[in-house]
Every structure is written in C-alpha cells, then in structure tokens.
Amino acid sequence: MRVSASINEPFVLSTYSSSQRLSKNASSSKNQQGHPSVFATYGKASGSSDGYATVAAQADGVHVLDISTLHPVISHTLGPSITFSCPAITRNTQEGDNDICSTYVGIASCSDIPAEDSGCTIWMWRQNLSGRLEESTSQKKKTVLLQHQISGLYTCDELPTRILAQSPQSEFTILDVDLNVKKSLSASQDTQTLLRTYCYSRSSCTFLPLQASPQTGAVVVSVEVSKDSTRIRVFCVDNTDEVSELDISTIPIKPDQILDLSCSPSGVMSFLTRDGTWSSYRLEPKDDNSIESINISEPFRLTGLSFKSKASSSEQVTLLSLGSSHVLLSALTDSPAPEIILLLWDLQYSVLLASQSLAIPSTLSQTKDVTVKLTLIPASSSQALLVLSAHTADTGRKSDGTSLRSSVLVVPYMCPATSTIANALGQASSGARWIDQAASSSVIAPSHDPFKMRVLSAMRIAMEKNLPQAANAAFFEWEKRESKAVGEASKNEAGPSQAVLTHNFVRDLLTTVIQPSKPANSPYSSEVVKYLLNHKVVNSSMLNGGLLASLRYKNDWQSIELALEQVIDLSEAEILESLQYVVARHRSNVVPQDDNAMDVDSVTDVPSLPSFLSLCVSYATTPPALRSAIRRSLKEAEDIYAVLRVLENWIKQWSNRDPRLVPSKKDIVKNPHGIFIIKEKEKEGTRDLPSLPNVLSFLQTLLDASFLTLLQHPPAHAVLRRIQAQIEPEIVFTDDMEQLRGPLEMFAKAHMKAVREAGQDKSKKPLGDWRQRRKEAHERAGLSIGLYQLEQLVL
C-alpha cells in the first residue's frame, strides 16, 4: 500500500541575534572556532504534545521552548561573554506531582571560568516546572570539570539516569544526572578526530548482534577519522555502566571528502562528499562481535546546489535520517537568487519523495565574510528542526550597523515508516532536477538504436549550420518512417500507430533543437518542440535550468502555453517566473524590439496577461510551493496589483451569472440501462474565463503570500474591497443552499443506488436471507407514499 510523503511549509520557532562580540571571542578562543552561533536539540516532555526544543545561543544563553505553543518554558540568560562548545540537552522527568526539567550544556569560554578549564566544563540547572513561579525561575547551577574537551552531550530513554559526554578525539565519559562521573572510555587506537556521533535506545537498533549487546541500554555509533580512513565505532552501555564494544568497521570514503552524513537506528548510513556524490550503506552483523557495511544502492551525484560550485559553501548542506533509508536534505540552491531547499529522499531506490523550498531570511544576508550554516536536528516523528545560523568567516569584519539574526525553524513532514517499492514507483522523474546525469547534454546517449542516432546526428549538423528547417525535415521523415514500421508490426492492434519516443531520445531532441548553450538569437524552429509537447512525452527536467526557462530564452511563447497544458510536472517557481515576465510586459505595454532578434518561425510575441494567467490559474499547484514562488517572483506591488485586477474581473463575470439549481431537459439523458442521468458537462471554465474554484484558490494563495505588500499599495485597496463585495453574497448563497443537503440527500443516494444496480445481472444476484428481503421491502414501502385511505373501526 502506497504511503504518501510530504514536507509542509516550515515556521519560525525563535530567532537570536548574532553578536559581534561572538566574532571577537571566536578569534581569541580556538575552542569556539567553527561552532555555529546557535545550537538546538529536541527532548520529549510530558507537558507538551510536541516536546521541547533546547536552544543554546552564543553570547546569549540557554532557552527551552515548547514547540506546540512556541513559548519559552525556561530561559537562562548568561551574558555576552558566554560561548558554548556543544548543543545543550534537556531531560524532563516526573517525580510524583512535580515536573522536573534538567538542562545540561558544555561551556567553551566564560568570564567565570579559568582559561585552562575552557571547553572542559559542564553546567547543569534543575528546575521544578510545577512549582511556584519563583521556584521555576531560580538559577541554581551545578558545575563539573572533566578531563577532556567536550564536543557533545547525549541522553537515552533506556538510561534515564545517565548522561554521555564526548570529546573531539572520541573519548567518552558516563555521568549520572547530578554530574557525578561514573565511568570513562578512552579513544580507540589511531583515532585522530571525531566526525559525528549518534546515540540510540537499544530496543530501536536492529543492526546489532544479539549475543554481543545488552537487551536494554544505549547504543553509541561514532564516525571517526583514522589517518586516511573513515571508521565506524559502535559500543553499548547498559544500566550498570558496563560497556560492550564491537569491532570497528571501515567505510571506503576518504574523510577529508565528507561534507555531511546521516545514520538511522536501523543501521542505514549515508555520506555526501564534496563533489556531490551521495553513497548509502547498511550496517549488518558480521559475526557475534562485529558488524560490516554493505552498499544498498548505487551512489548518485547531486547538482543544482551551492556547495558544488563554491568551496566556501561546505556548511550550506545538512542531512538528517528520518528512519529506514529515508533521508532529509537541506541546502542552498545554486542560482543567482539562492533559496533554501528541503528534499526527502529514499536512498534505497534513489528517488525523491517530497520537496519544499523557502526564502533565505532577510536577517541572514550573505556576503563574502558571512554565510548561512544549515543544521537539521531530529525532533518528533512528524517534525524536524532546521537551524539557520550566521557563520562569520572574517572575524575582523566591522559592524555595518545591521544585526544578523539566526533562526530556529520547525519543519513538519510526513514520511513512510519503512522504504517500499510501492512508494518509490513513479517517483523517478521527480528528482531528475537534482541528479547530475552521467551523459553530458551535448553528447548523444549511446543507448539509442542506429536509426535514432542517425536522425539526431543529422539534426545536430543542420542546427550547427543554422538550418532549423532541415532539422525539422530530418525528424519528421524519421517519424513518418518509424510510425509506418510500428503500424505494420502491430496490424492487429486498434488505434493509430506512432513512433516510439523514449525519455533519453526526447531529451536529446530538445537539447539539439533548442540549443540552450547558444545565443538566444540563433536560428530556431518550434515545430519539433510542439510535436513532442502534443504527444505528452516532455517533462520539465529534460533541460538544464527548466523547460519554461529554455523556451522563454528562445521567446517561444506558443510552446510555453502548450507546455502549461500538456506537461504535468512544471514547478510553481518556473511558472511564476514566466508569469512575472508577462506581467512586466503587460505593465510596460511595449514589447522591446531587438536589432539582433532571432529568426523564429511560427513564434508569437508575449501573450496577454489574462490569457497567460488563465493557464497559470488552471495548472495544478500546491499552496505552499505557490506561496513561496509568488514571494520570490512577484516582489513589486505593481506586479501583484496587475494580477489582482485580472482576478477581480473574472470573479465579477462569475458573480453576474445566474445560478442554475435545476438542470434543463437538454442536460438530462438516459444511460444504456434506461436510467435518467445528468449529461456529463464539459470542463468548467474556458481560456477566457477559468473556473471559479481555480480563480478563488489562486486568489487565496496570492493574498496569503502578498497581503501586507498590497496593504502598502493604496491603489490595491479599492480592488480588495470590490472583491470582498463580490464574494460575500456568494458565501451567503452557498450557506443557504447547504440547508438543502439534508432533505435531498436521501433522493440522491437512492438515484446513485439505482444507477449502480442497473448494470448488474439480476439473475445472478443472490436472494439473501428472508429477513433481509423483508427489511428491504419495508424500507422501500417507507420511501413511497400510496393512496390516502380512510378506515372505520366499529366497536
């Protein structure tokens, strides 16, 4: 059974200022270098349905927030001199009627700590959230000094009385909840540094040998660097503080090439390298005391993301396992106006299940010395945390008067519990935009048969000689010959025969004809493009940069309009980019004439705004993605106002139409079984007047995305009032008609039952039990009203 996956629009949990003092502290403290300006973790809480988020903001303090209410629960303000060496963690426990919250954090530097103790200190606060206000706000602090630097703190549900602290060199210390040291675990031999650590409950881990691990406790998976090798170290801690360690496994990836990695309790690990290659492995028991890593799918290479084009953008990508082989990726796109993209992948089948995009907050301006660091944090089964922190590369930069603010966002999502082929079917093309194809766009794929290779070669030669008509002739000659051959091979099959158009062949045809790498004024003909669009064999990802952008580059607006009718996977972003281009030409009312205009046959100029907007309104979109695209493309109030005027005119035309409550005689026909039914109507709406539901849906999304902008534009006020005046009577009318649902519903059900049973073979219908037949007879008699009768009773 197919389970849908989705990523909803993220919302802001909290924001924090990135102080300039932090940059100075970072330059003077090597322990603080490379740390983000904000840390965040998640913890379950009995008093919150969505749990608590614990945020450690550098040069600020530690804050515990309730995700369900977005309100702070606890705040420890520590001053501008404080810096943290690792994320803070929170344990929420019940002690009788008291709700106890314990918060732990590693301190990198502070004015109260000697320089030699920096990076080795843990602070802890214990507060009763059920007590009086003065008790819950008390700042009683406990301190412990460890023998090693602290780079991470971890808790486990199956070890509720223990805290694990780790060092950058993979040393571990086990402490109780009052920060008393219980046991220390030294680093493995040859370990130079620690890349990442994951802590799971033993019951959730399915990749461990049963004989070599306790039944309950904590399982720690650490990825370590040893010389030029990447190693996986796994050990278990039980409730008596006994440690059982498995033999170390090696991953065949050089550690200096790893950008980020992910791990799930089921043992699925993935590694993303600097060249964009994404590899996935599964940890499995090898024997009673060791595990091994096995490839679960072929590696693939990502494209279109900023970390591939800029060496300084390595922190602009992050991975998070959502269980099984599902991994959530967040990164910045590689475009002139970058945005944050969220991609949910199933690595077992290398398919994209869901995606979501959002704009970079204006408080995080990207300059040469300031970049955005992305970090995904696991939360509940349906939410993740995304930390957007300002990362300063040049610590000597002067303040420009603007305050950078880091943000913690909540990302709601839906993800299947396990990876199945049913969920992966039909998703191969959804991730094509983000996967770097093995063959270059200028090289014809060698998988074509000789006839296709020959026609592609002839078309390429013709286009290089600026003879697009010759390329058209070569293609249609092949198409005629191929259709004839297919028809002769399938004489017994009904329907017209046509040439076989495979995905790779269509992609190469588009690349050959459109020539996106050549200047826009190069000769071009749209005949082949229109043929492919009419046969519905084109998808949006076949051309680098998108289909609509490539056609707009050639000023082929006829093909763009045809694509909006025939291509089903156009993104909201590219649709709104084309709409913004049309709006700009509509506002200027002048199509610029270029002396170097290209030679195009059968290509019209930019269409009118109502005509093109009608196609955009009728195209199937999702509100979150459409809102994001509107904010990105329609930034000017004048552009939004122009679109709003067209929508208002359409609503006015619909409101002036008289409603038809009863169908006419022309609309009623008999079906083949003699039952009267309403004739199927043609698709509501036309090119000149889209359907009212589509218009209202687009209007609602437009207002959600740009209502504040319209409020600041006085000419839009009158239009908004007129739209309100036109919609309010329709709402009242709809409410009045809703009252007829109850009285008419029984007749509608009876008619649907009659239509459904009319085609059944009554001779084969089982008679059923006599009680059931008598009950049905009584029901039929109750629905009918017979002749009035008068009976006289004589006593």
Image (cartoon, grey):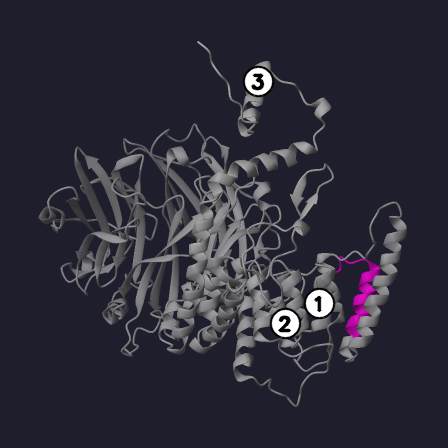
Residue 634 percent coordinates (x, y): 47, 72
* First to last magenta residue range: 441-462
The residue pinned by badge 1 equals: 510
Contact? badges 2 and 1 (CB < 8 Å): yes
Label 2: how many Cα within 10 Å (few below 14, some 14–19, many 20+): many
Callout 2, which amino acid?
A: Ser
Which residue does the image show at 42% across and 76% down from the upper left? 637
Earlier along the polypeptide chain: callout 2 or callout 1? 1
| Quarter assignment of residue 211 | top left
- The foreground one among 317 and 152 is 317
Q: Dot 3 surroundings within 10 Å: few (below 14), some, or many (20 or more)?
A: few
Label number found at residue 550: 2
Q: Residue at x 79, y 74 (%)?
A: 461
Depth check: give the residue in front, 693 or 208.
693
Q: Nearer the viewer, residue 722 or 154?
A: 722
Q: Which amino acid does label 1 sit on?
A: Leu
Between discs 1 and 3, the one toward the N terminus? 1
Measured Cα–Cα span from mark 3 to mark 2: 69 Å
Q: Is residue 94 visible?
A: yes
As for residue 452 lying within the magenta part, the answer is yes
Nearer to us of marks 1 and 3 is: 3
Tell me if mark 1 has few (under 14), some (14-19) or many (20+) residues whose alpha carbon lies within 10 angstroms of its own. Answer: many
- Amino acid on which the number 3 mark rests in the picture: Arg
Is residue 325 depicted above or below 285 in this figure?
below
Secondary structure of the residue carrying tag 2 is helix
Q: Name the residue under label 3.
A: 774
Q: Distance between the residues labelled 1 and 3?
A: 68 Å
Residue 584 in the image, given as x and y percentages of width and height: 53, 79
